[in-house]
Image (cartoon, grey):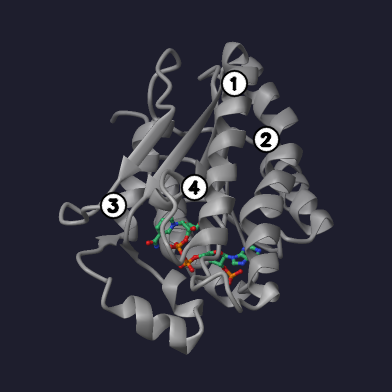
């Protein structure tokens, strides 16, 4: 039997309780990685962990709000303490609150900056020493940080100002960090999904939902993005997929 590519490695997925994060965690486990699952909804994480264990995998539930610096840092620390190492960080947790800038509730902007930017940074900062160590001493001699941005991280549109701001920031940070650690074999990758059927849009105010509903066209499944992430993290050591923009076929912009 062929050994699964990620056997013996450990991955931490933020926002693993639904959507892209849940699909990615299951797919990583399918490739042999032990997975740490971070998000706020413990019941969802427990259900996912049970499914992974039923398939013979290893899963650790980490109930964490990563907008809190300590909880983010603890999520990384517990992963390493319980599972022994950290080879792969999937920085996926995010929130998308759309609508005009004029009159927008500032609390929505704060939520997006706190999670999409600061939460991601807390996890990246805490994980980096472990990823550098894994790249040095693991059998694969490579480690991965995959940061989930968006099509909105490439192009700003009317109505997505602050979401787009946060995702552009994720892109800039990822590229800078990629250059910093490339020679030490920590690959930093950026994934930019287009419309994907998850819970993401459902957190918008009803009036915003009404105005964006007619923009919903074809959508991908969370598993489609998980596939792309699995492609990235299973490349051989000398290949780094720096950036992936993935739209449903019919999505024009
Ligand atoms: N769906 C799309 O069309 C699309 C397109 C482009 C980019 N993306 C990006 O893909 C990523 C995943 O989103 P999704 O589409 O899968 O949406 P989703 O189903 O709403 O998932 C978001 C995840 O983030 C977690 N989360 C929210 N607040 C958190 C916090 N404070 N601490 C820890 N975890 C938190 C949620 O879990 P809890 O509520 O349990 O904490 C959930 O697991 C996001 O970064 C999003 O911007 C999505």
Which badge, 4 or 1, is on the more N-terminal residue? 1
Query: Disc 4 vs disc 2: which is toward the camera?
Result: 4
State yes or no: Cβ of the residue under disc 1 lies below 8 Å from any atom of ligand 1.
no
Residue name at image x 60 percent, y 76 percent: 104
Residue name at image x 20 percent, y 65 percent: 218
Whether the residues at callouts 1 and 2 have beta carbons within 8 Å, the answer is yes
Which badge, 4 or 2, is on the more N-terminal residue? 2
Q: Disc 3 and disc 1: Cα gap in Å?
A: 28 Å
User: Quadrant where the N terminus lies?
Assistant: top left
Q: Disc 4 and disc 3: Cα gap in Å?
A: 14 Å
Residue bearing the label numbered 3: 224
Figure check: 68 above or below 31: below
Query: Callout 3: few (<14), some (14-19), or many (20+) C-alpha neighbours within 10 Å?
Result: some
Residue name at image x 45 percent, y 67 percent: 159
Q: Disc 3 and disc 2: Cα gap in Å?
A: 28 Å
**Residue at the limit of the structure toward the front, as seen here:** 102
Query: Disc 3 vs disc 2: which is toward the camera?
Result: 3
Whether the residues at callouts 4 and 2 have beta carbons within 8 Å, the answer is no
Query: Callout 2: few (<14), some (14-19), or many (20+) C-alpha neighbours within 10 Å?
Result: many
Residue bearing the label numbered 2: 85
Q: Disc 1 and disc 2: Cα gap in Å?
A: 9 Å
Secondary structure at numbered mark 4: strand
Secondary structure at numbered mark 1: loop
Horizontal side of residue 237 vs 213, given as left or right: right
Residue 138: in sight, yes or no? Answer: yes
Residue bearing the label numbered 1: 138
């Amino acid at each position: 039997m062929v050994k699964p590519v990620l056997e013996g490695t450990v991955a931490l997925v933020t926002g693993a309780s639904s959507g892209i994060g849940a699909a990615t965690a299951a797919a990583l486990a399918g490739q042999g990685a032990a997975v740490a699952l971070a998000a706020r909804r413990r019941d969802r994480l427990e259900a996912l962990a049970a499914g992974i264990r039923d398939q013979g995998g290893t899963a650790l539930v980490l109930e964490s709000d990563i907008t809190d610096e300590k909880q983010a840092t603890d999520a990384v620390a517990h992963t390493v303490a319980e599972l022994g190492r950290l080879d792969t960080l999937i920085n996926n947790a995010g929130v998308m609150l759309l609508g005009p800038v004029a009159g927008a509730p500032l609390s929505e902007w704060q939520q997006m900056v706190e999670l999409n930017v600061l939460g991601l940074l807390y996890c990246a900062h805490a994980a980096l020493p472990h990823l550098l160590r894994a790249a040095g001493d693991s059998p694969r001699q490579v480690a991965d940080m995959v940061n989930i941005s968006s099509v909105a991280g490439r192009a700003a549109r009317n109505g997505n100002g602050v979401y787009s701001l946060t995702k552009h920031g994720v892109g800039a940070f990822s590229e800078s960090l990629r250059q910093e650690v490339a020679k030490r074999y920590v690959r930093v990758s950026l994934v930019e999904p287009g419309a994907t059927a998850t819970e993401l849009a459902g957190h918008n105010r009803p009036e915003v939902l009404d105005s964006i509903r007619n923009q919903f066209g074809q959508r991908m499944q969370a598993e489609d993005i998980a596939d792309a992430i699995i492609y990235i993290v299973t490349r051989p050591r000398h290949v780094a997929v720096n950036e992936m923009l993935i739209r449903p076929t019919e999505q024009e912009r």
